[in-house]
Amino acid sequence: MKYSLYIAAAADDKRAAYSYVLANYTDIIAKGTYLTAGERRFDDSFCGHVALQRSLRETARQDGVLDVTVVLDAGGLQEIGLELLDVSPQLLRIYFSA
């Protein structure tokens, strides 16, 4: 089954919220929110990894063979995606600008 996993983040001066939606072509399969707290609440790398892990665990719980497209918002989550792929953002910009 083909799924799309959408992950987004938003923050104010007190906390940050990470939200995910797992959907296929007919319906929303799973959704959730991760609110940050404590002294690491604005550590984008740590909290972004936690949010990504939680969403991927929920995705892994689905039955059958999975084909997942992960879509990260334009905020700090893209940096986490590039880190997981081991791609330098500077090289990516140069590649697309040529």
Image (cartoon, rainbow, N blue to C red):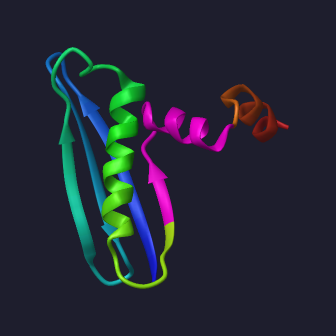
Q: As drawn, is 73 to the left or to the right of 62? A: right
Residue at screen point 58% across, 41% down: 84
Quarter of the rendering containing residue 6:
bottom left
Q: Is residue 26 above or below residue 70?
A: below
Q: Residue furthest right?
A: 98
The verdict on residue 4 being magenta is no
Quadrant occupied by the N terminus: bottom left
Q: As drawn, is 92 to the left or to the right of 48? A: right
Q: Position of residue 71 (x, y in %)?
A: 47, 54
Residue at screen point 64% across, 44% down: 85
Quarter of the rendering containing residue 88:
top right
Quarter of the rendering containing residue 15:
top left
Query: Camera-side residue: 19 or 52?
Result: 52
Q: Position of residue 86 (x, y in %)?
A: 67, 38
Q: Position of residue 9 (x, y in %)?
A: 31, 38
Q: As drawn, is 57 to the left or to the right of 36? A: right
Quadrant occupied by the C terminus: top right
Q: Is residue 96 above or below residue 14?
A: below
Query: Camera-side residue: 77 or 64?
Result: 64
Q: Which residues are magenta?
A: 69-86
The verdict on residue 77 being magenta is yes
Query: Camera-side residue: 62 or 6?
Result: 62
Q: As drawn, is 56 to the left or to the right of 35? A: right
Tally of numbered tags: 0
Q: Is residue 47 above or below residue 29?
A: above
Residue at screen point 37% across, 35% down: 48
Q: Position of residue 17 (x, y in %)?
A: 22, 36
